[in-house]
Amino acid sequence: MIYKNALVDGEITDIEVCDGKIKSIEKTDADGFDLGGKCVYPGLVDIHTHGCVGYDTMDGDGLCEMSEYLAKNGITSWLPTTMTVSMEKIKSVVNAELPKDCGAEIMGFHMEGPYISPKRKGAQNEKYIKAPDIDEFEELQNIKKVTIAPELDGSMDFIKKCDAVVSLGHTDADFECAQDAFRAGAKCLTHTFNAMPALHHRDPGPIGAAVDCDGYVEVICDGLHIHKSVITMLYRTFGADRMILISDSMRATGLCDGEYEFGGQTITVKNAVARTQDGAIAGSTTNLMGCVKKAIEFGIPASDAFKMASETPARLINVKKGRLLPGYDADFIVVDDNLNVIRTVVGGKLIED
């Protein structure tokens, strides 16, 4: 398959696809599907999203419906993200067969909890919070990334033995503890600034440790969770190679205001803001493409905003996605001048409306 007349990095070219991979990016005389000179970016990779269009990862169904919605909005691959519930429930969800060919590709799961701090639980259910257990964890399948609080008993041993990407989050760890965790093998911070100690000039906490240890940082760029100035500060500090845009979306994403279930709790969405009954912000109602647009609105160059939502998260979880280069998965999107998604291609196949 050849996609003709794609505007890539300011140049009109063709994208040849073979067996789901990009074979070449160069002008050819062969016929193909005409993209009309529209701008093409790598498909977005959301490594932290709980749900959308009325579905949640923990429902145990609806993954296909979520994948369809995500693909239409420029997200070509994702990690369905779990909540802090019983391990039996988590196991039943992540060990199930993953659906295929129904939109955005499911690469595995992001397990957020139950190995977190009750002090920083956010919208997670404290009833099921527990210390990390590597033997228990190894009974789970399809886990690509796991969030833990490194101050919990057994965390350092867990990090050293875990074969998934370990991210630090929902944590009350100080700088030294977080630094030890990065040195043990942790790679990232989960929704940076949210559900962790703040960056203080005498107590830099996990964020300071991520700076010193060359860690990655997830950032919810919906204009609500983190102030614009902090978003741009993180960008200047970590750069597009280490800052990752995420949606942290919940089931109300793509729907209207109202009451929704999230991790066994009732969440109220008002003016597109999701909160628990005690007022805590509970995930976002924005998809990752919305976060990219918000980053650009905040002054981040479009090329870097897209990179932080494609190449950088793909590199963190070690998948060959997020770049328009031969040998990479043929996942890309076509956008208009206002960055509205016109076409989505996953594994070389055009996703039809």
Image: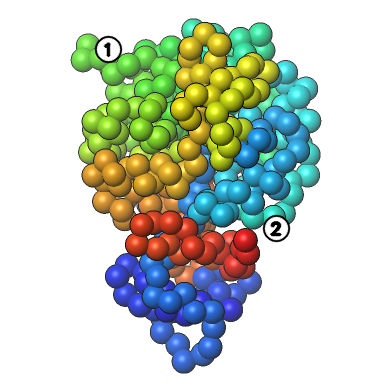
For residue 173, above or below residue 80: above
Give SS at disc 1: loop
Q: Give neighbour class at mark 2: few <14, some 14-19, many 20+ (Cα, 10 Å).
A: some
- The residue tagged 1 is 203
Name the colour scheme.
rainbow
Q: Is residue 319 visible?
A: no
Residue 280: image location, x then y, percent: 48, 14
Q: How many marks?
A: 2
Residue appearing at x 32%, y 42% in the figure: 295
In the rendering, at what x and y percent does residue 325 appear? 44, 67
- Closest to the observer: 173 or 176? 173
Tell me which residue sits at (52%, 8%) in the image.
278
The quadrant holding residue 130 is: top right
Residue 197, image quadrant: top left
Q: Residue placed farthest to the bottom in the image? A: 29
Q: Is residue 157 above or below residue 35?
A: above
Of the 4 image quadrants, the one containing the N terminus is bottom right
- Give percent across and percent down for residue 234: 28, 33
Q: Residue at x 54, y 79 (%)?
A: 33
Q: Of the residues shown, which amino acid type is indicated by label 2?
A: Asp
Up/down of 240 relative to 34, above or below:
above
| x, y percent for residue 298 | 26, 41
**Where is 179 relative to 254, above or below?**
above
The label on residue 101 is: 2
